[in-house]
């Protein structure tokens, strides 16, 4: 599992520190004095139990940005804020599993974990900018449940789009917004969400201008009621072509489209390679892995660039660098900390 850990924690440093012990508390507070941001995801009250809650740490460092990610938030109903929560719990309680049509089995991707982390990064950036203006730190409360509920567009639509109330939550919703099989056994995705795209699809791709005169399809709202009929028409067209031919015809008239890639094909994508998103130069042979590709930086900065300089570290790999070089402890201190299982 270490290659996966490395992918998720690339570029980080790792120290060991048992915060349940008093001396570890003091070490942590020394770190806080030198830190801009703390990010934690313990159950509510855990850091406070250890004497390391925000109210205490902000006295040590008034400019500290303290971000907390939890399943149901730091503030709210005790029955939820005190719960231990993992991605599967949050996807279930936010309706995401239902919206995606997963009635059996676990989530296929940890989108709750990833999305909450991204939102936390945005919040931290905003807090740092506020601190630049005011010199004040602050506490950031991120609820995974909040985040997942906010992206559950299908649940929101059912409240005010009358047509959606008549649809099973797992059913198709938007007209010509689907996957379609091709002659060579591949899958194609395409969509026509604007009237211009719809007209180009009918006239120049399907070669069925008569669809534009069909009263069932003469505006987007009406087309919502005939999703299956439209899919059958597009399916007949797509199954007569190879994936490459279909993509070529759609792109020639600027119809948004793409290929459905398998898990094995994703890391062969030419544009991911061109954008430097595929790092495979790290050696994982120590863990019995011949090759592990690590995603590159997601954000491209014109001035500061970005790179993946290291894989995720082994536990405590940076103890000496942080405790001796940064905090000023000695070799003897480290031996004592290790002997007493403080680190």
Image: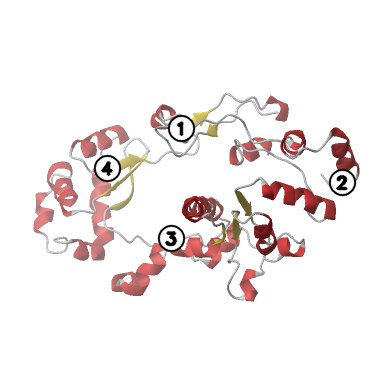
Sequence-first disc among 4 and 2: 4
Is 258 left or right of 300, judged from the image as shown? left
Which sits in the foreground, 313 or 184? 313
Determine the CA span between mark 4 and mark 1. Answer: 44 Å
Residue occupied by mark 4:
238
Residue 304 numbered tag:
1
Determine the CA span between mark 3 and mark 4. Answer: 31 Å
Circle 4 packing at 10 Å, graded few (<14), some (14-19), many (20+), is many
Check contact, mark 4 vs mark 1: CB within 8 A: no
Residue 124 at x, y percent in the picture: 52, 52
Numbered disc 2: secondary structure: loop
Which sits in the foreground, 184 or 3? 3
Tell us which disc is closer to us: 2 or 3: 2
Residue occupied by mark 2:
341
Circle 2 packing at 10 Å, graded few (<14), some (14-19), many (20+), is few
Sequence-first disc among 1 and 3: 3
């Amino acid at each position: 599992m270490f290659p996966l850990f490395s992918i998720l924690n690339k570029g980080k440093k790792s120290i060991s520190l048992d915060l349940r012990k008093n001396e570890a508390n003091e070490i942590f507070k020394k770190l806080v004095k030198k830190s801009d941001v703390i990010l934690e995801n313990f159950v509510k009250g855990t850091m406070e139990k250890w004497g390391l809650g925000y109210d205490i740490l902000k006295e040590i460092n008034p400019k500290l940005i303290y971000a907390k990610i939890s399943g149901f938030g730091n503030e709210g109903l005790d029955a939820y804020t005190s719960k231990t929560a993992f991605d599967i719990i949050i996807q279930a309680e936010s309706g995401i599993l239902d919206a995606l049509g997963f009635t059996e089995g676990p989530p296929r991707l940890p989108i709750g974990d990833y999305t909450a982390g991204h939102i936390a990064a945005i919040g931290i950036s905003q807090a740092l900018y506020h601190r630049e203006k005011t010199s004040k730190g602050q506490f950031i409360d991120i609820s995974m449940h909040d985040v997942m509920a906010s992206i559950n567009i299908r649940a929101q639509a059912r409240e005010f789009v009358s047509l959606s109330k008549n649809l099973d939550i797992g059913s198709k919703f938007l007209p010509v917004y689907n996957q379609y099989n091709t002659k060579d056994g591949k899958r194609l995705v395409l969509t026509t969400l604007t009237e211009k795209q719809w007209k180009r699809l009918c006239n120049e791709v399907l070669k069925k201008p008569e669809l534009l005169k069909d009263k069932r399809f003469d505006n987007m709202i009406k087309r919502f009621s005939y999703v299956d009929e439209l899919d059958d028409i597009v399916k007949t067209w797509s199954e007569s072509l190879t994936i490459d031919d279909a993509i070529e015809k759609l792109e020639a008239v600027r119809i948004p489209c793409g290929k459905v890639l398998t898990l094995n094909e994703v890391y062969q994508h030419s544009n991911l390679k061109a954008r430097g998103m595929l790092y495979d130069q790290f050696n994982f042979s120590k863990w019995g892995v011949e090759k592990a590709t690590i995603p590159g930086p997601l954000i491209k900065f014109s001035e500061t660039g970005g790179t993946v300089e290291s894989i995720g570290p082994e536990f405590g790999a940076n103890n000496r660098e942080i405790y001796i070089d940064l905090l000023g402890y000695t070799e003897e201190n480290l031996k004592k900390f290790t002997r007493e299982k403080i680190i």
